[in-house]
């Protein structure tokens, strides 16, 4: 039962679900329909859809043991896919005059991935935890109360990663630290 609950929490808190959902909600709330559609298409179509397709195909072929790419050695190859496409999406956001907050959010998200790649050379930090904490900082800039709730939701996500055996406590804590640092840097630069 515990593993089943952990699996549900892990899937619901997956960055490939939570971040695109956040993008759609925020862009369609803050921008007119046309601008929100363009922004969402750039981010979701340019980054998330290609990433999800790659993860699906590699998992299906057996190159990745699971969709989360929880194996530290296998994870190396996903960084070499994520960083270039996220760099292109970030560059396009700057080129198409997206809001400075969006551009900086993408830039610090890219930085978080790059730092995670370096950290992955010695330890596999939890990307679920790091990106959920980073996302909570993004939410805090819009609504501090909801941002704090999002931050607290990271606790069961971290628990689920440990229960499922995808990460150790140390890996979850390091992922959390990376998310906090990226979030604080982003807020400082925006501030």
Image (cartoon, helix red, strand yellow):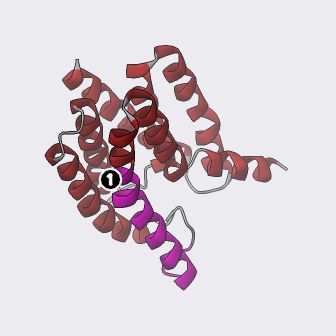
Q: Is residue 178 above or below residue 124?
A: above
Q: Is residue 110 above or below residue 105?
A: below
Give residue 118's position: percent from left, percent from top. Answer: 27, 55
Give residue 150's position: percent from left, percent from top. Answer: 54, 28
Residue positioned 53% across, 84% down in the render:
61
Under circle 1, the secondary element is: helix
| Circle 1 residue | 42
Residue 46 part of the magenta segment: yes
The magenta-colored residue range is: 41-65
> In which quarter of the view is residue 182 placed?
top left
Q: Is residue 112 above or below residue 84?
A: above
Residue 113 part of the magenta segment: no
Name the main secondary structure of what is drawn in magenta. Answer: helix
**Residue 79 makes an appearance in the image:** yes
Residue positioned 49% across, 35% down in the render:
25
Residue positioned 58% across, 57% down in the render:
166
Viewer-nearest residue: 65 or 33: 33
Name, please, the residue furthest toward the top: 145
């Amino acid at each position: 039962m515990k593993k089943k609950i952990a699996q549900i929490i892990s899937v619901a808190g997956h960055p490939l679900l939570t971040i695109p959902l956040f993008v759609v909600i925020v862009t369609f709330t803050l921008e007119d329909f046309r601008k929100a559609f363009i922004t969402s298409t750039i981010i979701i179509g340019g980054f998330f859809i290609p990433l999800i397709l790659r993860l699906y195909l590699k998992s299906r072929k057996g190159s990745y043991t699971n969709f989360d790419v929880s194996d530290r050695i296998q994870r190396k190859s996903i960084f070499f896919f994520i960083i270039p496409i996220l760099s292109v999406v970030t560059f396009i956001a700057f080129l198409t005059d997206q809001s400075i907050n969006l551009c900086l959010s993408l830039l610090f998200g890219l930085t978080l991935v790059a730092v995670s790649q370096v950290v992955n050379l010695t330890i596999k930090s939890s990307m679920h935890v790091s990106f959920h904490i980073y996302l909570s900082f993004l939410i805090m800039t819009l609504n501090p109360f909801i941002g704090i709730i999002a931050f607290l939701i990271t606790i069961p996500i971290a628990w689920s990663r440990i229960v499922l055996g995808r990460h150790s406590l140390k890996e979850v804590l390091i992922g959390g630290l990376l998310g906090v640092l990226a979030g604080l840097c982003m807020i400082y630069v925006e501030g």
